[in-house]
Image: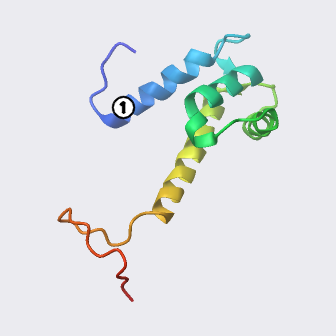
Amino acid sequence: MSKEPSSDLESAMQMLIKTFHKYSGKEGDKYTLSRGELRELLVEELGTYLGNCKDDGVEKVMNDLDANNDGEVDFTEFIILMGALTVACNDFFLEFKPEDKPKDGSKGNSAEKKD
């Protein structure tokens, strides 16, 4: 990608593309992730969110993503994973957000709840 991104969203899109291609093609087709490449990507790039990724977890992710049953994950299938993980993270953070955080930056009274 030769053009510099002008927004955070463009940067995020470029990072997704670069990250996919950083791992794809090490074991075969340069446009897909093998099981081993997928495992390496999950451990190295998403280890904080996913924890210690076990082989059976990688197998489940691979089976869920591999829509065309070719034993590899292409870029479209990878983006489906990233979208699903992003939705899950958003839901998690929404569930555990601080209630009624004051807009003025003060801590407010966290023990106080509204009816």
Q: Where is residue 34 drawn, in percent x and y?
A: 74, 21
Report whether residue 34 is seen. Answer: no
Number of numbered tags placed on the structure image: 1
Q: Where is residue 5 drawn, in percent x and y?
A: 31, 25
* Residue depicted at x 37% and y 29%: 11
* Residue depicted at x 81% and y 25%: 70
Q: Amino acid at mark 1?
A: Glu
Vertical placement of 96 versus 3: above or below? Answer: below
Q: Where is residue 52 drawn, in percent x and y?
A: 68, 36
Front-lying residue, 37 or 75: 37
Front-lying residue, 3 or 38: 38
Query: Along the horizontal axis of the image, is 43 left or right of 90?
Result: right
Location of the N terminus by quadrant is top left
Location of the C terminus by quadrant is bottom left
Query: Along the horizontal axis of the image, is 33 left or right of 88?
Result: right
Secondary structure at badge 1 equals helix
Report whether residue 11 is seen. Answer: yes
Q: Quadrant of residue 12?
A: top left
| In the image, farthest residue toward the left | 104
Q: Where is residue 7 drawn, in percent x and y?
A: 29, 33
| Residue where numbered disc 1 is placed | 10
* Residue depicted at x 37% and y 83%: 113
Vertical placement of 17 versus 9: above or below? Answer: above
Q: Residues within 10 Å of mark 1 (few under 14, many from 20)?
A: few
Q: Quadrant of residue 28?
A: top right
* Residue depicted at x 64% and y 31%: 42
